[in-house]
Amino acid sequence: MPLGPQLPPRRRRFLTLLVTVAIAMSIVPLSAPPAFASARFHIECDFVRHRQVDPIVSFGISKSDHLHAFFGNTGVTASSTYTTLRRAGTTCNNKGDKAGYWIPALKKTGNVVKPVAGHFYYRGIHRHLGAIKAYPPGLKVVAGNAHATRFQSTRVVAWSCQGSSGTGQATIRDCGAGGRVKALIKFPSCWDGRRKDSADHKSHMRYATRLGGGLRGCPRTHPVPVPELTMAVVFPIRGGSGVTLSSGLYRTMHADFFNAWNQTALINLIVNCIHANREC
């Protein structure tokens, strides 16, 4: 566009600015997501109870190996099924979430500690956000190792402090006066597309592989991407002195997830938050 010399200087500057803006708009699409967009949704579920049952690892057995702290679904028993969980209530702030979430009970100098809060983050971490599917109804998964003899990878189990992000580590650090310890357990986000459970409650799922640029993908054996669930449980203790779990040393932290979501509600959140690259 010629800005001929016949135009006044102020007019030429104005037209130059218009051309610059037009070029910038042609390079950066208006639909580009914000730089700090996060494809995820966050559910809060209050603590339900401590109970020594586990319908995934010890289905039908009246007393499981160790005590658990339950969140979300209020009707978890040793013989819970997808159908019975759907009929029960929930402590979650989204009433469509009737999933069962549980971890081993945490103890301080031998005394069971009641958790303060449970936060559940469903993230889209895959290269193609639009390909992420909902978990199938009744999916059962265990993350972490209840029999760990050494500290687990912080990509699966980590410890942090309430209000702190990106600082998870293998050991429990001192969170300071008034601070609270937070346990983080991350679940795999690749499903084999066939099984809702497996003998070890893990083999039907896989953790995504790193592709670079912060993005990940699924292996051919487990080709279906699903949200990456992270459980974040806060305890009213400031550090790790005297801390154990009902499953053993605190390095044995693990978690169970039994999907009993209302599938329509779950799919809507995945579409409107994860597929849309929004934080909800």
Image (tube, helix red, strand yellow):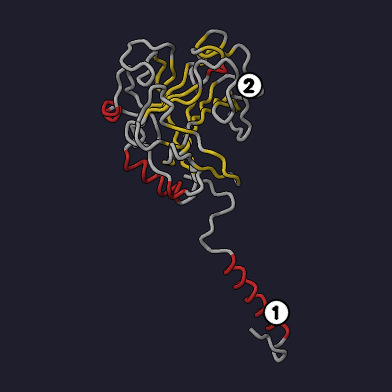
Mark 2: few/some/many CA within 10 Å (<14, 14-19, 20+): some
> Three-letter amino acid code at disc 2?
Thr
Residue sitting at the far top: 110
Q: Is residue 106 left or right of residue 203?
A: right
Residue sitting at the far bottom: 6
Residue identified by numbered label 2? 171
Q: Is residue 70 left or right of residue 180?
A: left
User: Which corner quadrant of the image does residue 13 belong to?
Assistant: bottom right
Look at the picture and state if 175 lies above or below 67: below
User: Which corner quadrant of the image does residue 58 belong to?
Assistant: top left
Residue sitting at the far front: 220
Look at the picture and state if 11 lies above or below 122: below
Q: Which mark is residue 122?
A: none
Q: Is residue 33 left or right of residue 47?
A: right
Mark 1: few/some/many CA within 10 Å (<14, 14-19, 20+): few
Residue 171 pos. (x, y %) = 63, 21
Q: Nearer the viewer, mark 1 or mark 2?
A: 2
Image point 66% across, 86% down: which residue? 2
**Mark pair 1, 2: CA separation:** 60 Å
Q: Which mark is residue 13?
A: 1
SS for dot 2? loop
User: Which corner quadrant of the image does residue 55 belong to?
Assistant: top left
Residue 204 pos. (x, y %) = 41, 30
The quarter of the image holding the N terminus is bottom right
Question: Which circle's residue, 1 or 2, is located before the other in the chain?
Answer: 1
Q: Is residue 15 left or right of residue 105?
A: right
